[in-house]
Amino acid sequence: MVYGVPIITLRKIAANYFPDKEIADILWKEDNRELKIISTLTQDPDSFEDANQWVDEINNLELAEQATMNLFCKLPDAIRLAKNWVQSDKLYVKNCGFLLYTRLFSQNIPINGEDTVIYFDSVNEALNSESLLLQNTALTSLKRLGRQSVLHAKEILSQFSTNPFYDDLKFEFDFFFQI
């Protein structure tokens, strides 16, 4: 069920409440766009333990974006969740993983070691998929990672030099770093 209440209005409603796990959980269980979004705004990130359950229940892009921006990126284990989610076979779980990486990279949170390999493999898989949604979210996360430093940008261009999205990436990084 969707009432069409604007996000700004939902944010104003949620601002009247302190973070409360019980209320947020009750709101999330309702099959209603507005209540689900308010639940992401009122959930307490420090006591939230149901991220994997919630992400499994996401079935549209707006809710994926709102849950990621309002809640998932604030979780202490957000980088681990992103890594696990981009490896999922479920479209919206994988999408949330890339959205979460995008948010984390925008906050200059790095990835290292094996996580980088997993991330690049997942991006490559998404860019070669038939899903425009996954292509877009993976490409956006890759661009945000590349914006962290010229070294990241060069590594990405090297990794994806034969990919059809190379020119898009090159344009992005040339804008920021004149590579």
Image: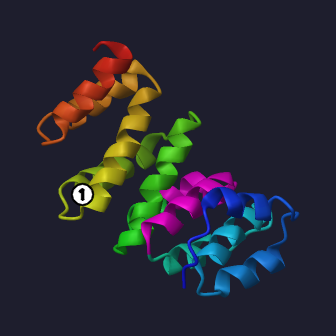
Image coords of residue 29 (percent x, y) = 66, 86
Identify the residue shown where x is 56% and y is 52%. 79
Number of marks in the image?
1
**Magenta-drawn stretch, dominant element (helix, strand or loop):** helix
* Residue 78 drawn in magenta: yes
Q: Assign a secondary structure to mark 1.
A: helix
Q: Which residues are magenta?
A: 60-82
User: Left or right: 17 with respect to 78?
Assistant: right
* Colouring: rainbow
Identify the residue shown where x is 34% and y is 73%. 89
Where on the picture, by quarter, is residue 172? top left
Q: Amino acid at mark 1?
A: Glu
User: Left or right: 166 with respect to 156?
Assistant: left
Identify the residue shown where x is 84% and y is 71%. 20
Name the quarter where the N terminus is drawn. Answer: bottom right
User: Left or right: 18 with respect to 65?
Assistant: right
Instruction: Check disc 1 and report the residue beneath it.
Output: 125
Q: Is residue 50 above or below residue 13?
A: below
Where on the picture, by quarter, is residue 142? top left
Q: Callout 1: few (<14), some (14-19), or many (20+) C-alpha neighbours within 10 Å?
A: some
